[in-house]
Amino acid sequence: MSTVTKISAALALVASLGACAGRQAIPVTPMQATDNDLACQPLQAEVVNNNAKLLQLDQEKISRQNSNLAVGLVGAVLFPPAVFLLDMGDAPETEAAALQQRNDHLNKLAAQKGCFTKVAQG
C-alpha cells in the first residue's frame, strides 16, 4: 500500500468518524418568557406549527433508521469500515420531546385563557 493510499484511507476514516454522531439537536425551550403575552391565535398557530415539525422529525427518524440499516448491511457484507458512517445521534428524538413539552405548555396556557380546546398533538 502506497503512502498516498494510506493517507487517503486515514483521512476517509477520520471524516467518517465525524458522521457517527449525526446532527446536533437544537431543542426548543418548553417555556419562554413571552408565552404569557401570547393571544389565543398565536398560541394555536404555534401548536399547529410544532405539530408539523413533529411530523418532519418522524420522517427524519425513519430516514435515519433506513440509512443505518443500509450502511449496516454494506458494512457487514462488503466493506466493514462503512459501519463508521452509522448515524448514532438522537437529535430527532430530543427535539420531538422538547416540542411535545412545548405543546403541553402552550395548551395549558390556552386553556387558562379560555382560547380553545386542546389541539391534537403529533
Image (cartoon, grey):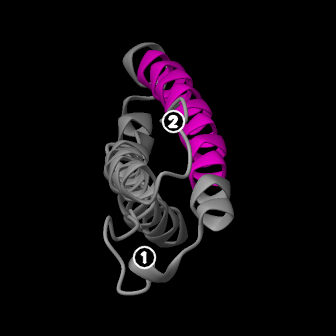
- Residue 89 % position (x, y): 33, 49
Disc 1 secondary structure class: helix
- The numbered disc on residue 35 is 1
Q: Name the dominant secondary structure of the magenta segment.
A: helix
- Residue 63 % position (x, y): 59, 30
Task: Work out which quarter of the rendered image holds the N terminus and state it.
Answer: bottom left
Which residue corresponds to the image point at 41% horizontal and 49% vertical from the top-left? Answer: 111
Q: CA distance from mark 2 to mark 1?
A: 18 Å
Residue 23: quarter of image? bottom left
Horizontal relation, residue 14 to residue 119: left or right: left
Question: Which region shows up in magenta?
Answer: 47-74
Asked if residue 71 is among those painted magenta in the image, a careful observer would answer yes
Residue 72 seen by the camera: yes
Asked if residue 78 is among those painted magenta in the image, a careful observer would answer no
Which residue corresponds to the image point at 55% horizontal and 29% vertical from the top-left? Answer: 67
Q: Amino acid at mark 2?
A: Thr
Q: Amino acid at mark 1?
A: Asp
Residue position for label 2: 117
Horizontal relation, residue 14 to residue 71: left or right: left
| Residue 65 versus residue 35 in the image, above or below | above
Residue 17: quarter of image? bottom left
| Residue 39 versus residue 105 in the image, above or below | below
Quick one: 119 or 73, which is closer to the camera? 119
Which residue corresponds to the image point at 40% horizontal and 77% vertical from the top-left? Answer: 36
- Residue 14 % position (x, y): 38, 66
Q: Residues within 10 Å of mark 1 (few under 14, many from 20)?
A: some
Quick one: 88 or 34, which is closer to the camera? 34
Disc 2 secondary structure class: loop
Residue 20 seen by the camera: no
